[in-house]
Amino acid sequence: MAYLNQAEREALLDELKALSFRKAKGRLRRLDAKGRMAFYRNFQRTGEYVTCFVLEGKGTRVELVETLERPEGKLIHYGVKRLKPRFTFASVVVEPTPENRT
């Protein structure tokens, strides 16, 4: 297995920061055949929605962080009774998994 070292993880971080959320998600799906999405828009931190990918073949864990955009005084109507949320891509966190010692 070829785990990503610190320089390669920083290069991946810089690459993902330049992309939109949708393109970053697609890039991570294609990056590693053994990779998987651990969770999608998990709301554990206040004001942040986290999507996590575990790239087992690369020894890396990537978190895509989004925030919910709430325009004041305006509601975003989608259909008759549903309000459609608008997410903005805030940041990316790239960290090694415990077995990655590079």
Image (cartoon, rainbow, N blue to C red):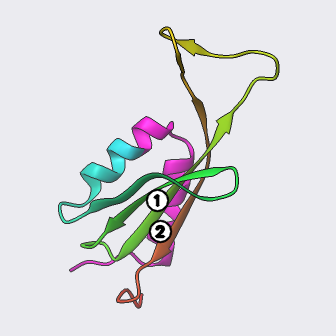
- Judged from this view, the residue extending furthest toward the right is 73
Q: Residue at x 52, y 58 (%)?
A: 13
Task: Return the residue nearer the eye: 23 or 75.
Answer: 75
Quarter of the image holding residue 14?
bottom right
SS assignment at label 2: helix
Q: Which residue is mark 1?
A: 12
Badge 2, how many Cα within 10 Å: few under 14, some, many 20+? many
Q: Which mark is residue 9?
A: 2
Q: Which mark is residue 22?
A: none
- The correct choice, above or below, for 2 with respect to 68 in the image is below
Task: Return the residue nearer the eye: 2 or 20.
Answer: 20
- The correct choice, above or below, for 86 with respect to 51 in the image is above
Residue type (three-letter) at the residue carrying disc 1: Leu
Residue type (three-letter) at the residue carrying disc 2: Arg
Q: Which residues are magenta?
A: 1-24
Relative to 44, 5 lies left or right: left
Marks 2 and 1, Cα distance to the nearest angstrom?
Answer: 5 Å
- Residue 80's spot in the image, x, y percent? 50, 8
